[in-house]
Amino acid sequence: MPVDTHVHRVAGRLGLIDAELSAEQAHRPLTELAGPENVYALHINLVRHGRRICHARRPQCGRCPLAVICPSAGLFS
C-alpha cells in the first residue's frame, strides 16, 4: 500500500492507524487492514477523499460522508 500524504492524513484522522506512525510505518498496518484484494481500492479512495474533502488545513467535515464515524470530525473548524 503506497502511503502518501493524503493516505497518511486521512487514515490517521479516521483512526485506521495510530497517529504517531510515520508514513513508512503505516504501510504494513494499512495493507493488513485492507487485505491484498482491496489495497488498490483503499489507496485510491483515501487519496480521493483527502483531495476532495479531508484537506490538510481546512477539512470539510460538514460535507464528509464519513463524519459520523470519524473521531476527528469537527476538530478543525
Image (cartoon, grey):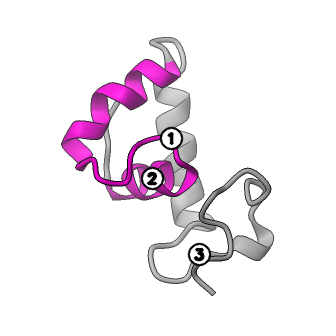
Hey, which quadrant is residue 19 in on the image?
bottom left
Check disc 2 and give the amino acid type: Gly
In the rendered image of this protein, does residue 66 appear above or below residue 24? Answer: below
The residue where tag 2 is placed is 12
Q: Taking 59 as reference, is 17 left or right?
A: left
Which residue is more in the foreground, 76 or 35? 76
Look at 20% across and 41% down and name the residue there. 24
Mark 1 is surrounded, within 10 Å at the Cα level, by few (under 14), some (14 to 19) or many (20 or more) other residues, namely some
Please report contact status of discs 1 and 2: CB closer than 8 Å, yes or no.
Answer: yes
**Percent x, y for residue 23?**
25, 47
Task: Tell me the distance, in whole angstroms, between the alpha carbons under discs 2 and 3.
Answer: 13 Å
- Mark before the other along the chain sequence, 3 or 1: 1
Please report contact status of discs 3 and 1: CB closer than 8 Å, yes or no.
Answer: no
Helix, strand or loop status at disc 1: loop
**Percent x, y for residue 28?**
30, 26
Helix, strand or loop status at disc 2: helix
- Name the mark on residue 16: 1
In the rendered image of this protein, does residue 41 appear above or below residue 19? Answer: above
Q: Taking 76 as reference, is 74 left or right?
A: right
Task: Tell me the distance, in whole angstroms, between the alpha carbons under discs 3 and 1.
Answer: 17 Å
Look at 60% across and 77% down and name the residue there. 75
Task: Tell me the distance, in whole angstroms, between the alpha carbons under discs 1 and 2.
Answer: 6 Å
Does the magenta segment cover residue 72? no
Check disc 1 and give the amino acid type: Leu
Which is more foreground, mark 2 or mark 3? Answer: 2
Which residue range is magenta in the image?
Answer: 5-34
In the rendered image of this protein, does residue 25 appear above or below residue 9? Answer: above
The residue where tag 3 is placed is 59
